[in-house]
Image (cartoon, rainbow, N blue to C red):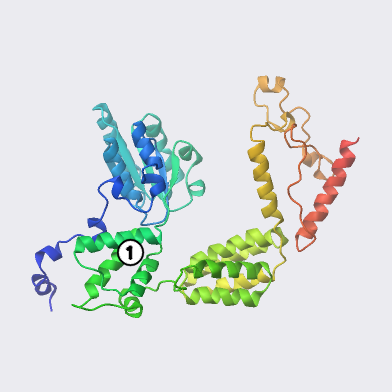
Amino acid sequence: MSGDLFASRVPEEVANRRPLADRLRPKTLDEVTGQPHLTGEDGVLRRMIASGSLGSMIFWGPPGTGKTTVARLLSGEAGLAFEQISAIFSGVADLKKVFETARMRRMDGRQTLLFVDEIHRFNRAQQDSFLPVMEDGTVILVGATTENPSFELNAALLSRARVLTFRPHDEESLIELLQRAEQVEGRPLPLDPDARASLVRMADGDGRAVLTLAEEVWRAAREGEVFDTESLIRIVQRRAPVYDKAQDGHYNLISALHKSVRGSDPDAALYYLARMFDAGEDPLYLGRRLVRMAVEDIGLADPQALVICNAAKDAYDYLGSPEGELAFAEACVYLATAPKSNAVYTAFKAATRAAKENGSLLPPKHILNAPTKLMKGEGYGDGYRYDHDEPDAFSGQDYFPEKMGRQTFYDPPERGFEREIRKRLDWWAKLRKERNSE
């Protein structure tokens, strides 16, 4: 059957109908779901709008959480012109054109909210090009990213923008979206209760995904047909994590996996890893948890643990599923059989507490640079000893703020590679004592 002939049989109102996710796009901030900390009555964005002044922002969060929609609604609420570009399809010429349009608009007394999707894909020079138009008020920048801004965006850009975190939709929020979809469609989803719960889990916190899946179900259903979970999986070609009815199986199993690794039991660890794979858990979630175990429970007792886990992630990216799952199994066994240490984890927590308690103290002057004559006159850099010029390349100077005195956060155990680190620290402590008593 030709495409033209088929099209002639499709009702015009169906053929021209927009995707469900687009039809359900919120028209006001009140309709936004899943982000009450931002758009709720006492949310951050509500407070900004009430103050009458919006600043530049970075929206950080997973796909399908409403970043683009909220940016567009903000421009409407604040009476700003809205411009949107994507870092995937835009270059320097496109940026210059948008900036010039915003300047002309500003001369007419109207400010522009510039929404930049996937802003982390711009290189450093392109990111720097935003700084002048942000500083002079030509645009209010709202950048959206799924990546950690601390790692992917320039420090100069981050210093001029507030980072707001968008959270994945929870189960309640996704259910609300499905109920809205049923109201718009004027018919219930043809799913039994278990299949409906599976559909929500398949979306994995993505609001756009849950609506797209619902649309697939409506397209596939014949009149009077109701799908169970098995039929749903066959229709949408996607599997949801299947845990116990109370939905706490996910947390119970990841906890059991983590504790099995910490307890040096590779067999139990493999068992729980396999159970989570079998339940349909996202492999990259498991990969992230293995990385966390490497830095929390193995640490510097075996510095290769983190390297192995990151290599497993790269192997999974290369091989895909299910072949790549073996790389995570290998990393899991490596972690379970590695020497254990939480010394760095404990030290970092202690250092963080000390930083909060003594955050206003200046470092000692002798370790600060003195780029000006005034600073030299104030004693900056006086008495600093260059460690490489000292015997054993160690001066034994004190580097903590004077009011704090020396502190000890890191206490490596006599296990694994940290046994060698312990020897070095003990040797330096001995030298420090000798040289400071001279």
Q: Horizontal placement of 314 versus 166: left or right? A: right
Q: Is residue 424 above or below residue 400?
A: below
Q: Is residue 374 above or below residue 266?
A: above
* Residue at the image position 67 percent from the left and 74 percent from the top: 265
On the question of residue 84 being in view, the answer is no
Depth check, front residue: 207 or 284: 207
Residue where numbered disc 1 is placed: 210
* Residue at the image position 68 percent from the left and 41 percent from the top: 354
* Residue at the image position 66 percent from the left and 70 percent from the top: 336
The mark tally for this picture is 1
**Horizontal and vertical percent for residue 209?**
33, 63
- The N terminus: image quadrant: bottom left
Q: Is residue 150 above or below residue 371?
A: below
Secondary element under disc 1, as helix, strand or loop, is helix
Q: Horizontal placement of 257 versus 369: left or right? A: left
Task: Name the residue at the right extreme.
Answer: 438
